[in-house]
Amino acid sequence: MASKERIQRLKEETRISILDAAFKIVKNEGWQSLSMRKIADEIEYTAPIIYEYYANKEAILQELTRKGYRVLTAELAEARDTQAIPEKQLEAMWLAYWDFAFAHKEYYQLMFGVEMNCCVMKTECPEMQSPAKMITDVIQKILQVPLDNDAVCTKYYTFWSVVHGLISINIVRQGVSDEINQQILKDAINGIIRSMKD
């Protein structure tokens, strides 16, 4: 039994090494440079061994996308939990979303297709739904309507459009100071929150 556990542990370590190597390549050279051959070279394996763990590059991208969503979800939860009032929770979560986009730019690019094609998930995964669910839960508390109410969805997409749009502009072309970006971001978030109370 111990040898089966050891083999399983080694397989999991190799799987993690492959993902870590892929992400290292991306951080150093960009998404366009990622290839199965480069991953194999990075971990000093042959390419066929990589294919034993991941069917193709797309499978690696999907796993990295899931990981990105897990990190985003954790950061949103941490931001939410610093506040007690739903309006403040919502603001903290969107500011954390902004911070995530720049602290983990490579994940953000992959997850949302900024300057690259985003990863197309073969099946819906809970990791992709978690950030939106957390935010819509807070929006629903503020609006005091059922969660399936169209207003909840509308407000979520209003927030997301503004914040994602500003992030995308800044990732593609840095031209505005961080102070101005922060002011625009906070003005937009607080303006949408105020509109929810009218």
Image (tube, helix red, strand yellow):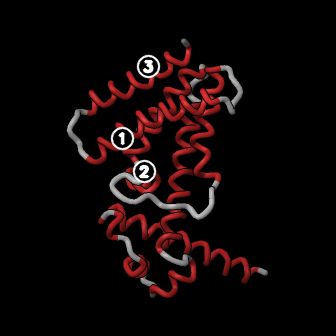
Q: Which residue sits at x=54%, y=28%? A: 155
Is there a contact, CB below 8 Å, between mark 1 and mark 2?
yes
What is the three-letter code of the residue carrying label 3? Gly
* Image vertical order of residue 3 relative to residue 169, above or below: below
Q: Residues within 10 Å of mark 2 (few under 14, many from 20)?
A: many
Q: CA distance from mark 3 to mark 2?
A: 25 Å
Q: Nearer the viewer, residue 7 or 145?
A: 145
Q: CA distance from mark 3 to mark 1?
A: 18 Å
Residue under label 2: 108
Q: Position of residue 72 (x, y in %)?
A: 52, 46
Q: Position of residue 46 (x, y in %)?
A: 45, 87
Q: Earlier in the sequence, mark 3 or mark 1?
A: 1
Q: Earlier in the sequence, mark 3 or mark 2?
A: 2
Q: Which residue sits at x=61%, y=45%? A: 130
Residue under label 3: 191
Is there a contact, CB below 8 Å, between mark 3 and mark 2?
no
